[in-house]
Image (tube, rainbow, N blue to C red):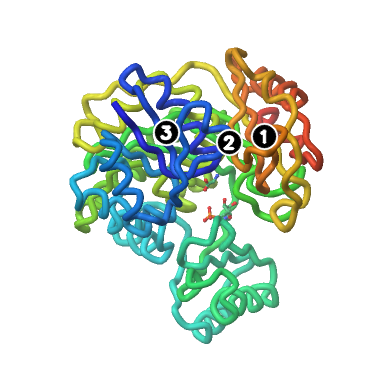
């Protein structure tokens, strides 16, 4: 069959790699893709938000299945456009992708269906938000309602910071239209875990767990980024916690969406905080995590095409979803200065070192073809993933493998997976 993948980051590279493993797949296209994805897919110059062009391309090439990797097109309704034209597509419709697209919606859903999450209030008026702060306990968390590239969350230690935060989000619209509404919520303490799940509208099957490192600097310092590295599984996500989450968080979320007439098919990514009072939802995403996909998919044994199709057809209960009994660590190689400002266009050396090395992967996030070879073309440039029998071995392997790659201004965190030592 022919598959089209929509997106251009490390996540889409990992999806393309996994799709390429399926014996059922003869040809992969990626729109717009990147220089690394080209190893598995023919990249086509159509942007992820050009829904009609994407659908026309899928028709012209007789694509059997389109997989949407990114949040923006999902929240914008790309799945509805494809379905209206009779095209098979993996991902939630617009009315379900709102689970990620509006934090106010997701908080109200959790409250209505008693799904554990931080206490909160929604605001569409800066004056009311400021008045509410007078009664708040600190630290407090401010969130722009809409999509903001993972940057619309402010953790404020003092009243002064919080007031400035409300102004940034709602008055100055630092995160654009995402800030026309906001959520103010209780600060939760604990360890974070990411659990990605496959959903077919009724049935939900969790993948193996992972943990991201969102801050730019060692020791969780510096600005929030898209993610500087991941490990999988999380040693803190025990069987007991998993059982709790399945019963009180995962299935209730799927049932709540169905009860609201917003049947969810695709990926639900649960951002969880393991608090003293049990696991609570930090956020929902309607797609694979980036760079969570880069550690979860290399460990997935089941044919991903079978799983995608079961989600679309509502037959996920018949799928035996399996993961390897090992571990993986991904270290992101970024351009110095990310996430603020950085230079691009430097030659990337050493990519060939990953060829035919079992258990080692280099997923491209921001790369492009230059005249002398592949060059840096983004803040996050590459995600280097390595597997191991356990987390410590995987981490040692990943930190060895990043030395195989060189480019000017190469920057990475030295402490990805440090938490493993505390397990
Ligand atoms: P989000 O985009 O909602 O995942 O928020 C980004 C990051 O902010 C999360 O990964 C957490 O590290 C942090 N965060 C968000 N909400 C809270 C909260 N209520 N309490 C503590 N930390 C939070
Ligand atoms: N790594 C976090 C995300 O994809 O949202």
Mark carried by residue 374? 1
412 over 135 or under it: above or below: above
Q: Secondary structure beneath disc 3?
A: helix
Q: Mark 2 points at which residue?
A: 35
Q: Nearer the viewer, mark 1 or mark 3?
A: 1
Label 1: which secondary element: strand
Q: Viewed as shown, does residue 273 lie left or right of 310? A: right
The residue depicted at 28 percent of the width and 52 percent of the height is 93
- Report the image quarter containing ligand 1: bottom right
Q: Where is residue 125 in the image (x, y as percent from the top left)?
A: 47, 83
Q: Is residue 269 visible in this depiction of the protein?
A: no
Which of the two discs, 1 and 2, labels the residue nearer the N terminus?
2
The 10 Å Cα crowd at callout 3, few under 14, some 14 to 19, many 20 or more, is some
Viewer-proximal residue among 80 and 313: 80
Residue 223 on image: x %, y %:
70, 56
Disc on the earlier residue, 2 or 3: 2
Q: Which residue, as the protein is rendered here, is positioned at the far right? A: 408
Give the left or right position of residue 104, taking residue 289 as reference: left
Judged from the image, the secondary structure of the residue bearing numbered disc 2 is loop
């Amino acid at each position: 069959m022919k598959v089209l993948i929509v997106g251009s980051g490390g996540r889409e590279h990992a999806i393309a790699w996994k799709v390429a493993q399926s014996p059922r797949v003869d040809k992969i296209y990626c729109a717009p893709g990147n220089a690394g994805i080209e190893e598995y897919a023919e990249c086509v110059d159509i942007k992820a938000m050009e829904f009609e062009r994407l659908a026309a391309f899928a028709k012209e090439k007789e694509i059997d299945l389109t997989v949407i990797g990114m949040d923006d097109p999902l929240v914008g309704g790309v799945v509805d456009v494809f379905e209206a034209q009779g095209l098979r597509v993996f991902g939630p419709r617009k009315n379900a992708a709102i689970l990620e697209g509006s934090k106010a919606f997701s908080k109200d859903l959790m409250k209505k269906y008693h799904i554990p999450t931080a206490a909160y209030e929604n605001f569409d008026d800066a004056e009311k938000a400021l008045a509410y702060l007078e009664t708040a306990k600190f630290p407090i968390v401010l969130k722009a309602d809409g999509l903001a590239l993972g940057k619309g969350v402010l953790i404020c230690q003092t009243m002064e910071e919080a007031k400035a935060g409300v102004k940034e989000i709602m008055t100055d619209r630092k995160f654009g239209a995402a800030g026309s509404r906001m959520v103010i919520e209780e600060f939760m303490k604990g360890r974070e875990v990411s659990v990605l799940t496959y959903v077919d509208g009724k049935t939900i099957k969790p993948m193996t767990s992972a943990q991201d490192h969102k801050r730019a600097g060692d020791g969780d310092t510096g600005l929030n980024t898209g993610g500087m590295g991941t490990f999988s599984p999380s040693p803190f996500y025990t069987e007991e916690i998993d059982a709790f989450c399945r019963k009180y968080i995962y299935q209730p979320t799927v049932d709540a969406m169905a009860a609201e007439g917003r049947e969810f098919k695709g990926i639900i990514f649960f951002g969880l905080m393991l608090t003293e009072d049990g696991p609570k939802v930090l956020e929902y995403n309607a797609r694979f995590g980036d760079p969570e996909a880069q550690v979860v998919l290399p460990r997935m044994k089941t044919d991903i095409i079978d799983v995608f199709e079961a989600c679309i057809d509502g037959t996920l209960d018949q799928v035996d979803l399996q993961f390897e009994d090992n571990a993986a660590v991904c270290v992101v190689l970024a351009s110095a200065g990310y996430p603020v400002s950085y230079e691009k266009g430097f030659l990337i050396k050493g990519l060939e070192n990953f060829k035919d090395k079992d258990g080692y992967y280099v997923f491209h996030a921001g790369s492009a073809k230059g005249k002398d070879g592949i060059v840096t073309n983004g803040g996050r440039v590459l995600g280097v993933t390595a597997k191991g029998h356990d987390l410590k071995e995987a981490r040692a392997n990943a930190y060895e493998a990043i030395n195989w790659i060189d480019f000017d201004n190469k920057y990475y965190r030295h402490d990805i997976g440090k938490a493993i030592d505390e397990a």
